[in-house]
Image (spheres, coloured by chain):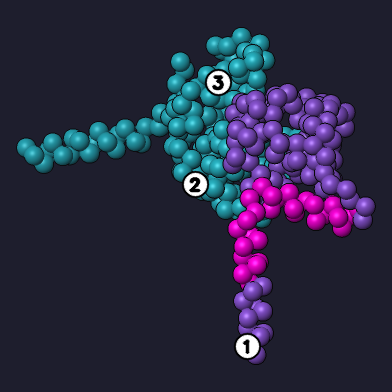
Chain colours: A purple, B cyan
Amino acid sequence: MKKILLLTLMFTGMAFSNVYAQSPQSVVLTFYENLQREQAVDFKGFSSERGQNLFVSAFSDGKPDIPSCTTCHTPSPTGTGKTRAGKIIEPMALSINNARYTDTVKTEKWFRRNCKSVMGRECTPREKGDFLTFMMGQ
Amino acid sequence: MRFSFIAVSLGVLFGASAQADDDVYPVVSDPLTASACGECHMAFQPQMLPARSWKAIMQGLDNHFGEDATVDTMAVSKIESYLVANAGDVGWDNEILRGVSSSSTPLRISELPKWIDEHDEELPANVWSRADVGSKANCRACHRAADKGYYDDD
């Protein structure tokens, strides 16, 4: 009985220390990593390079006036962007905007909306993870 | 003497509030509406469209002028309630809705006849493509305090 209690305490303690050791951004990234692992057994990690490529590429299946992420976010991850309706968009680079990518629900919401606008479809978990990996390194 | 002073003051106060100034609108006071609608564009004052328009807009967020602007169902219902309760045809004699037929459901403020009159008379047609304007939804490009409800001409 004592042993069980001790083990329970140990595991609870480990679980807590794990949560506190993680940044909010790594929690978000882990969410996509787990999704990707479910889809691809040979998952080899996200790629900042693929993420950058996604950010700067022009797509033809989305809205014609928003062919690329950079249309609104500017070509630089550190740039201050603007929506087509004139609202300021804070920079995407984590190094100068650490309020970014702290909330999975919010991150998912913007991927859902903006991937559809730019690419005409939802992004895959791998694309999202690549994109985040790139932006978190900027 | 004192009584009549109060009476006159009240008269001035009520007179002023009953006479709606078409350049001034109440601030969007619901925080959820202000934040959710204000993500991509200025959160427009609900008095600028009739209740039926807000209902149509809130039921069509999956294609919001070509964009996916969906929010969770709880938020849809809260925001819609606020917009409808404060709509331009609810207890508000609103000049901007003049000329809107009761059978039409305008989805853009910039489609209202009064809005068109106000903007077409004074502005060159190419003003909307100016880099610092870009869109008719960008009220603040010219009306700097539009988010506070002030739409003065200059």
Which one is nearer the viewer's eye here, A37 or A3? A3
Q: Chain of mark 1?
A: A
Quadrant housing residue B125: top right
Asked if residue B120 is among those painted magenta in the image, a careful observer would answer: no
Question: Dot 1: what SS?
Answer: helix
Q: Which residue is under mark 1?
A: A2
Query: Which numbered marker is on residue B141?
Result: 3
**In the rendered image, which quarter contains the N terminus of chain B?**
top left
Query: Which numbered marker is on residue B25?
Result: none
Which one is nearer the viewer's eye here, A119 or B68? A119
What residue range appears in magenta? Answer: A12-40
Above or below, B139 relative to B3: above
Instruction: Measure how far apart labels 3 and 2 are at the Cα level.
Output: 24 Å
Q: Which residue is under mark 2?
A: B30
Residue at (56, 33) in percent of width and height: B42
Marks 3, 1 in one chain: no
Disc 3 to disc 1: CB gap under 8 Å: no
Q: Chain of mark 3?
A: B
Local crowd size for mark 2, using a 10 Å CA cut-off: few (<14), some (14–19), many (≥20): few
